[in-house]
Amino acid sequence: MQADIPAKKSKFMDPNQIDHKAVFRFYEELNFFLPRENRKRDFEILFKGHPAIKDTIEALGVPHTEVEVILVNGVSVSFDYQLQEGDRVSVYPMFESLNVSPILRLRQKPLRDPKFICDVHLGKLATILRLLGFDTLYRNDLEDKEIIETARREFRIILTCDRGILKHRIVTHGYCLRSRVAMEQVAEVINRFDLSDLAKPFSRCTVCNALIEPVAKSEIKHMLLPKVEKHYNKFWRCTGCGRIYWQGSHYAKIWDKINQLVC
C-alpha cells in the first residue's frame, strides 16, 4: 500500500512529481492512528524533496507526542532528520519505564511528577483524575491555544481526543485517548504513564483541583446539614474553593472503583 505525503509548498517545484520512496512501519499502539491497511506491516510512501521525518509521521496521522524512538535504516534519529530515498523507517511509541538509554529518545525524560490539562470534552476524566490525587486542569471554555501554552508553561501533559492539538511543534508531552468512556480513559492514562504508585486518592478537590486538608468540625459546623453534623466527625476542606468533604455513604463504592483502577 502506497501513500503520498505532501510536503510544504515552498519546498517543491512540481507538485505532481514524485521524487522518492521510503518504507515505514509503526509499532504497538501507534497503529491506532493508521488506516487499517497500514497497521502492523511495512508500507511504502511516496514523497517529494526531503521533508523532516516529524512532518511525514504526522502527515500519516500519528501525533509526534506519541512517538519515542525513530529508527532509520537501523539508526536512531531525531525529529529533524530529513527523509531520503529508500529509507526504511521504524517508529516506536513512548516508553515511560523501559530503559532505552542506548538509543536516541525524542524528549528529555518522562514527567515523573505528572500534571495534566484536559481538553474541553474530558470533564469526567478530569474529575476522576483529581479524585485520584493528580493535578489536572480543566475548563470547558479553553481554546486549543490556551491549552498548549499552559501545558508548555506549567510542564503539563495534554490529554485529548483530538490528535490535531498534539501535532503542534511546541507540544512535548501529550496523549490521545482511544476510548470515549470516562472510566476506560482513566485506565488508559494510568497504564500509559505508569501512575498506579503515584495516586493519592482523596487528596485533591474534584471541583477546583486544589489540595484538601483536615479541618476541625467545630470550624465548619455552621456549614453542615443536620444529618451530616450528627453522623460524621472527620472532615476535610479544600484550600482553594472551601468545599467541605467527609466520608459519606458513597465512600466505600468510590474506594472499590479506585482499587480497580490503581491495583
Image (tube, helix red, strand yellow):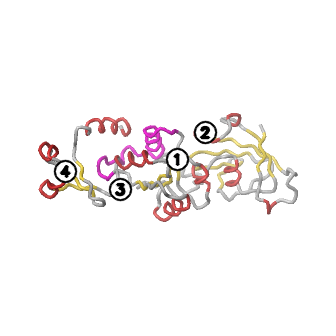
Q: Earlier in the sequence, mark 1 or mark 2?
A: 2
Q: Quadrant of residue 238?
A: bottom left
Compute the Cα span from label 3 to label 1. Answer: 31 Å
* Mark 4, residue position: 235
What amino acid is at disc 2? Phe
Closer-to-camera residue (190/77): 190
Q: Position of residue 256 (x, y in %)?
A: 31, 35
Q: Earlier in the sequence, mark 3 or mark 2?
A: 2
Q: Position of residue 192 (x, y in %)?
A: 48, 44
Instruction: State the mark number for residue 208.
Output: 3
Instruction: State the mark number for residue 194.
Output: none
What amino acid is at disc 1? Phe
Q: Earlier in the sequence, mark 3 or mark 1?
A: 1
Using residue 222 as the reference point, say whether residue 126 is left or right of it. Answer: right
**Dot 4: what SS?**
strand
What amino acid is at disc 3? Cys
Q: Position of residue 228 (x, y in %)?
A: 17, 45
* Mark 2, residue position: 32
What amino acid is at disc 4? Phe
Q: Which residues are magenta?
A: 179-205
**Dot 1: what SS?**
loop
Q: Earlier in the sequence, mark 4 or mark 1?
A: 1
Q: Quadrant of residue 232?
A: top left
Q: Position of residue 198 (x, y in %)?
A: 36, 48
